[in-house]
Every structure is written in C-alpha cells, then in structure tokens.
Amino acid sequence: MAPACAGREWYIRMFYTYLIRSKTKNWVYVGLTKDVESRIESHNKMQVRSTKSFAPFDLVFVQVSESQIEARDFEKFLKVRWNKESLLELLISAGGGMVYAHV
C-alpha cells in the first residue's frame, strides 16, 4: 500500500478490526475503524445506535491492517457468530486480557 501524504509528512494509514464486550450484558460487537480510542469512546458514550443499549464496553481484541480491504474481510469473518464465539473462547482460555494482532 502506498503511503498517504499529509503536508510534508508521509504515513501509512492503518485500519483496525476490533471486538468489544459489554460489561453489563452477554453481548459482543465487532467493528472496523481508523481510530480505535475514539471509536471505543463513542461506543461507551452511547453515541453509536447499534451498541448504545449495551454500553459500557471493554475492548477485547484489535487486529491492525494496512489495507481497508483486509480489515473489512476480517470484520466480516468475525461477524459470523461461530467465528466470533471461537475467538472469544480462545481469548478467554489465553488469560482474557486485551490482544493486539498485526497482519
């Protein structure tokens, strides 16, 4: 992927596929963003229609991708219930902490 130019600085745009888990209900959500911190904050401030009734959330998993297509494909893969549940089981068995992955 070619770097994008912001003024005189060059940078590589990163995309993040993330999984959050409700702290109060048995519910998980998978999403895609360019800014994980801001996106999780908007989920926890109940500014996202699809998740506001399940807030607050813990960030459980983040995968970093250099391509939006890769990130979107992984998001679609995780949105299949069996894949999402399998990932959660794997994370829980590995200690339950937050996990970052880079492709």
Image (spheres, grey):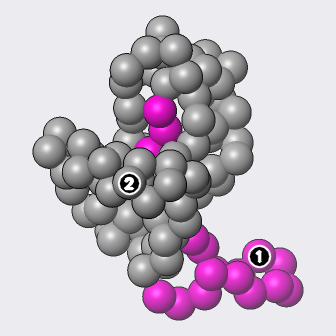
Prevailing secondary structure class for the magenta stretch in the rendered image: strand
Label 1: how many Cα within 10 Å (few below 14, some 14–19, many 20+): few
Looking at this rendering, what residue extends furthest in the top direction? Answer: 53
Q: Nearer the viewer, residue 64 or 20?
A: 20
Task: Provide residue 33's location: percent of width, then percent of height.
Answer: 52, 51
Q: Nearer the viewer, mark 1 or mark 2?
A: 2
Q: Mark 2 sits on what residue? A: 93
Q: Which residues are magenta?
A: 1-21
Q: Mark 1 sits on what residue? A: 6
Amino acid type, label 1: Ala
Q: Nearer the viewer, residue 92 or 28?
A: 92
Where residue 14 sits, quadrant-wise, is bottom right
What residue is drawn where x is 57% and y is 28%?
Answer: 57
Assess whether residue 31 is covered by the magenta stretch.
no
When the figure is inspected, residue 40 is found, relative to residue 11, above or below; the finding is above
Q: Is residue 60 visible to us here?
A: yes
What residue is drawn where x is 44% and y is 60%?
Answer: 94
When the figure is inspected, residue 61 is found, relative to residue 49, above or below; the finding is below
Looking at this rendering, what residue extends furthest in the right direction? Answer: 8
